[in-house]
Amino acid sequence: QVHLVESGGGLVQTGGSLRLSCAASGRTLSSYAMGWFRQAPGKEREFVAASSRNGITTYDADSVKGRFTISRDNAKNTVYLQMNSLKPEDTAVYYCAADPSHRMATSVSDYDFWGQGTQVTVSS
């Protein structure tokens, strides 16, 4: 089992940048494919980005493609989400999640372990 803790959220203006971190403890991060999701008020949790176990392969949602980048440092047991050119519609609670399979899944139900989330607010 792995325990995940997100950090790095905050308030930023439109066009700004933030880098989210997800620190893992318990089991080594290299055992998991990792994903980032977000949930805005009144909306369902949605997929943002995913990374293979070794970080070589990544996949981004169309809504963030070219603006957000997922990366990982397995030696530090940490996954990152670099967010650039932020828009007000990116405002949400962002969650990292771990999947022990080899998939880079995009569904919430495919991930077994979740962090508590970090709030990102983009002002217009």
Image (tube, rainbow, N blue to C red):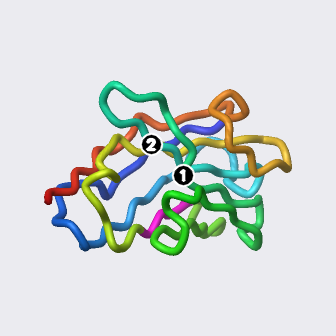
| Boundaries of the magenta span | 78-82
For residue 56, which numbered disc appears in the image? none
Residue 113: x and y in percent read 62, 33
CB-based contact (under 8 Å), mark 1 and mark 2: yes
Residue 56: x and y in percent read 76, 73
Distance from the alpha carbon under mark 1 to that under mark 2: 7 Å
State the residue in front, 120 or 113: 120
State the residue in front, 115 or 85: 85
Quadrant of the image containing the N terminus: top right
Q: Residues within 10 Å of mark 1 (few under 14, many from 20)?
A: many
The residue carrying mark 1 is: 48
Please, what is the three-letter code of the amino acid marked with disc 1?
Answer: Val
Residue at 29 percent across and 48 percent down: it is 91
Task: Indicate left or right for 112 with 37 as reference.
Answer: right
Task: Indicate left or right for 33 with 78 as reference.
Answer: right
State the residue in front, 83 or 21: 83
Q: Is residue 111 above or below residue 32?
A: above
Q: Is residue 113 above or below residue 51?
A: above
Please, what is the three-letter code of the amino acid marked with disc 2?
Answer: Arg
- Tag 1 secondary structure: strand
Residue 2: x and y in percent read 63, 38
State the residue in front, 88 or 52: 88
Quadrant of the image containing the C terminus: bottom left
Magenta segment, principal secondary structure?
Answer: strand
Indicate the quadrant where residue 75 lies: bottom right
Task: Indicate left or right for 2 with 63 as reference.
Answer: right
Q: Residues within 10 Å of mark 2 (few under 14, many from 20)?
A: many
Residue at 41 percent across and 48 percent down: it is 6
The residue carrying mark 2 is: 38
